[in-house]
Image (cartoon, rainbow, N blue to C red):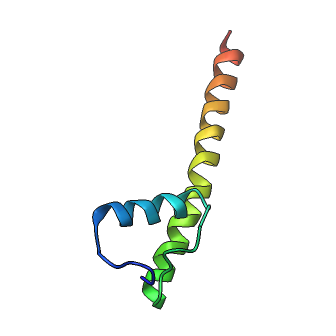
Amino acid sequence: FHGLVNFRRTEFMYFSLTTLTTVGYGDITPVNEYARSLANLESLTGQLYPAILIARLVSMEFSTSVEK
């Protein structure tokens, strides 16, 4: 990763959070193909997780209202 001086857990958590939320400040960037692929997968997960969660909650609410 470019931009990392010390490999501390907090820096990796910071990178992970900015990638999951698709903010991507650009201060830490993956350099090789493997790291880029993992960052892309994490970014995709960050976009799909809330969508799936909201869809699940809506379907639960809809099924509850249909049963009444």
Q: Residue furthest top?
A: 68
Left/right placement of residue 50 relative to residue 8 reads right
Left/right placement of residue 58 relative to residue 28 reads right
Find residue 26 and report its horizontal and vertical position in percent: 57, 74
Q: Nearer the viewer, residue 28 or 33?
A: 28
Q: Nearer the viewer, residue 61 or 31?
A: 31
Left/right placement of residue 58 relative to residue 37 reads right
Locate the C terminus by quadrant. top right
Locate the N terminus by quadrant. bottom left
Q: Is residue 8 above or below residue 65?
A: below
Kindly identify the residue that appears in the image at 52 percent across and 70 percent down. Answer: 41
Kindly identify the residue that appears in the image at 46 percent across and 75 percent down. Answer: 38
Q: Is residue 3 above or below residue 51?
A: below
Kindly identify the residue that appears in the image at 65 percent across and 32 percent down. Answer: 59
Find residue 15 and report its horizontal and vertical position in percent: 46, 66
Q: Residue furthest front?
A: 5
Kindly identify the residue that appears in the image at 29 percent across and 74 percent down. Answer: 7
Q: Residue furthest bottom?
A: 32
Q: Quadrant of residue 60?
A: top right
Q: Is residue 46 above or below residue 60?
A: below
